[in-house]
Image (cartoon, rainbow, N blue to C red):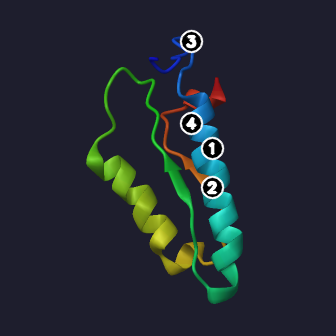
Amino acid sequence: MAPVVDETDDGWHGTMAVNATGRRAALEHAPHRIRINAICPVTPLRRRAEPEEISSAVAFLASDEAIHITGAELAVDGGYLAR
């Protein structure tokens, strides 16, 4: 029997599962000073994001400037979520 595929699914459910897993891992590892965050690169700007645009967000989250950020989802989305 073939698996059932929901052709109306836009990936939202999978994204939510990944984000929930990341938040859970962040809580589990926080006592060990391990930070876990997610970068959410969605781009409605009619072009793909340049690697530098994504890597800047990664560098920020990995820096000491983000020392108190864990379990976060950082949208690097060109304003997609602002709609």
Q: Secondary structure at mark 1?
A: helix
Q: Is residue 72 above or below residue 41?
A: below
Q: Secondary structure at mark 4?
A: helix
Measure the C-alpha gap from mark 3 to mark 1.
Answer: 17 Å
Q: Percent from the top left, x then y, of residue 22? A: 61, 58
Mark 1 Cα within 10 Å, few/some/many (few <14, many 20+)?
A: few
Measure the C-alpha gap from mark 1 to mark 2.
Answer: 6 Å
**Residue 72 appears in the figure:** no
Measure the C-alpha gap from mark 2 to mark 4.
Answer: 11 Å
| Contact flag, marks 1 and 2 (Cβ < 8 Å) | yes
Q: Which residue is mark 4?
A: 14
Q: Which residue is mark 2?
A: 21
Q: Which residue is mark 1?
A: 17
Query: What residue is at 56 percent from the left and 12 percent from the top?
Result: 8
Disc number placed over residue 8 in the picture, else none: 3
The quarter of the picture where the C terminus appears is top right
